[in-house]
Image (spheres, rainbow, N blue to C red):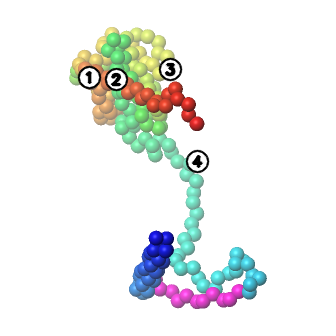
């Protein structure tokens, strides 16, 4: 069996060598006359030898530029901030909406608005939402803390089931249906919990 495998390997090697050799010979544009390397004395190291033939192919010498210091993160990762900012949660008992920046770059929420039941219920003041961060918009008067803004209005945040987030250009950035219950969080149990692991 071992002998048969060795014979198959030799046969496949010969077929591969023949296919590669014939495809190189057929391409008239890429053929280069190769010269036989000069015989070297046995004392000369191969690493010090210089070949007598040219390397086939083209050497492309180029320089590369480090763009990590010069790139504009906001233009690269956040070409359209409306695609990154969305309503991600709501709490009808405590009357708040959560707006999350799912992008990498910070987004200025100045002029963004919340629309519900056909009416604008809140317009964001100057507020920069960092990438990956969230802000809770709370209904009513209050002093906001980090990650929290109050509407400072008696108007409700929503007057219908669907709340819409609008960017300053008037485009819909996202919608959230308050009537749809949130799915229960998925709990993944470690199958090796309590077992000794090596």
Q: Residue furthest right?
A: 43
Q: What residue lies at 47% left-to-right and 86% top-to-bottom? A: 31
Q: Which mark is residue 146?
A: 3
Spatial CA span between label 4 and label 2? 43 Å
Asked whether the beta carbons under mark 2 and mark 1 sit within 8 Å of each other, the answer is no
Asked whether the beta carbons under mark 4 and mark 3 sit within 8 Å of each other, the answer is no
| Relative to 102, residue 45 above or below | below
**Is 73 contained in the magenta span?**
no
- First to last magenta residue range: 30-40
User: Residue beneath label 1, please?
Assistant: 180
75 with respect to 154 (left or right): right
Q: What residue lies at 42% left-to-right and 32% top-to-bottom? A: 101
Q: Which mark is residue 69?
A: 4
Residue 8, horizontal then vertical, whole percent: 44, 75
Q: What residue lies at 43% left-to-right and 18% top-to-bottom? A: 149
What is the secondary structure assignment of the residue under circle 1? loop
Asked whether the beta carbons under mark 4 and mark 2 sit within 8 Å of each other, the answer is no
User: Residue beneath label 2, please?
Assistant: 184
Q: Does residue 79 show up?
A: yes
| Number of marks in picture | 4
Residue 15, horizontal then vertical, whole percent: 43, 80
Residue 127, horizontal then vertical, whole percent: 45, 26
Residue 23, horizontal then vertical, whole percent: 41, 82
What is the secondary structure assignment of the residue under circle 3? loop
């Amino acid at each position: 069996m071992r002998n048969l495998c060795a014979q198959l390997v030799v046969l496949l090697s010969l077929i591969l060598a023949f296919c590669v050799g014939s495809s190189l010979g057929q391409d008239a544009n890429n053929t280069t006359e190769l010269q036989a390397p000069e015989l070297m004395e046995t004392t000369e190291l191969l690493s010090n030898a210089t070949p007598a033939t040219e390397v086939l192919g083209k050497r492309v010498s180029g320089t590369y530029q480090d763009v990590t210091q010069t790139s504009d993160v906001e233009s690269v990762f956040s070409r359209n901030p409306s695609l990154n900012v969305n309503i991600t949660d709501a709490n009808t008992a405590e009357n708040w909406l959560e707006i999350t920046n799912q992008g990498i770059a910070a987004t200025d929420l100045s002029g963004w608005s919340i629309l519900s039941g056909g009416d604008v219920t809140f317009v964001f003041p100057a507020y920069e939402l960092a990438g990956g961060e969230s802000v809770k918009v709370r209904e009513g008067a209050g002093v906001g803390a980090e990650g929290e803004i109050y509407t400072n209005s008696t108007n409700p945040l929503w007057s219908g089931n669907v709340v819409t987030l609008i960017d300053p250009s008037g485009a819909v950035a996202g919608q959230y249906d308050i009537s749809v219950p949130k799915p229960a969080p998925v709990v993944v149990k470690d199958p090796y919990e309590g077992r000794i692991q090596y």
